[in-house]
Image (cartoon, rainbow, N blue to C red):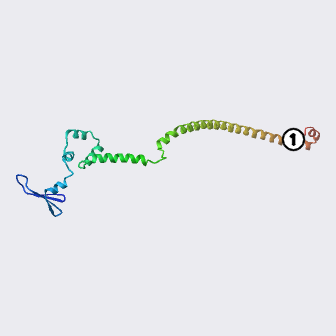
């Protein structure tokens, strides 16, 4: 009987006591003691840890999240992998503390600290806007009054010009008619 596992080839003779085992590794033939050297690190506790599944282990699997279950599947068959994963997690945590960017201000914390200042600026802007609207309303009323006053001034100016024209015309008529003495008395007119 011959069995090949990875790079090793096992051969042996069957018998009541198990027979002799020969191991062929890269073309060289070895005895049973070579197999003992190959599997020397493996003992009963390691074998149990790798291949035994009990009810408690199964119950733990049902309680895992999807990510934890995937990580557990990746570690099956790797001896001591849980310890390595825990060590890796502790190293990651330590490196995040050591290499944490100094002076970095997190955006949310920065915004929360600025919130009172921004809120005050908004209330000041609202007050300034109310003042602006009040001033704008007063300006519009003043402009309307100015337009009315300008229209009244133009009307009065027109009446003044008309009166001056009438006065000049009257003075000319009086001069032509010989009423010079009347004009000299009312020259301010």
Q: Compared to 159, does 35 lie above or below?
A: below
| Label 1 crowd (10 A; few <14 / some 14-19 / many >=20) | few
Quarter of the image where the C terminus is located: top right
Q: Is residue 37 in view?
A: yes
Secondary-structure class at tag 1: helix
Outermost residue on the bottom side: it is: 27
Q: Tell me if residue 1 can be seen.
A: no
Task: Give the quarter of the figure containing the N terminus.
Answer: bottom left
Residue 97 picture location, percent across and down: 42, 46
Residue 29 found in image quarter = bottom left
Left-right relation of 68 to 121: left
Q: Position of residue 40 (x, y in %)?
A: 19, 52
- Along the line of sight, which residue is nearer the eye, 22 or 142? 22
Q: Position of residue 148 (x, y in %)?
A: 71, 37
Q: Which residue is mark 1?
A: 170
The residue that appears at 91% across and 43% down in the rendered structure is: 175
Q: Provide residue 185's location: percent of width, then percent of height.
A: 93, 38
**Rendered view: 87 above or below 125:** below
Is residue 62 rendered to the left or right of residue 117? left
Seen from the viewer's position, the closer of residues 49 and 72 is: 49
Front one among 83 and 113: 83
- Look at 78% across and 40% down and name the residue there: 157
Q: How many marks?
A: 1
Q: Quadrant of residue 178?
A: top right
Q: Is residue 19 left or right of residue 125?
A: left
Residue drawn at (31%, 47%) of the image: 85
- Residue positioned most to the right: 181
């Amino acid at each position: 009987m011959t069995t090949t596992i990875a790079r090793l080839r096992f051969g042996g003779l069957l018998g009541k006591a198990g027979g002799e085992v020969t191991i062929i590794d890269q073309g060289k033939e070895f005895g049973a003691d070579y197999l003992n050297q190959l599997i020397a690190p493996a003992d009963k506790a390691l074998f149990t840890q790798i291949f035994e599944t009990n009810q408690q282990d199964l119950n733990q699997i049902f309680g895992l999240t999807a990510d934890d279950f995937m990580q557990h599947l990746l570690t099956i068959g790797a001896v001591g992998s849980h310890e390595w994963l825990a060590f890796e997690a502790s190293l990651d945590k330590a490196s995040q503390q050591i290499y944490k960017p100094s002076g970095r201000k997190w955006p949310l914390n920065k915004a929360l600290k600025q919130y009172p200042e921004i809120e005050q600026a908004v209330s000041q802007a609202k007050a300034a806007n109310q003042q602006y609207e009040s001033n704008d309303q007063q300006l519009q009323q003043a402009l309307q009054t100015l337009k009315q006053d300008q229209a009244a001034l133009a009307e009065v100016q027109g009446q003044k010009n008309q009166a001056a024209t009438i006065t000049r015309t009257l003075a000319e008529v009086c001069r032509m008619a010989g009423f010079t003495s009347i004009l000299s008395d009312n020259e301010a007119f």
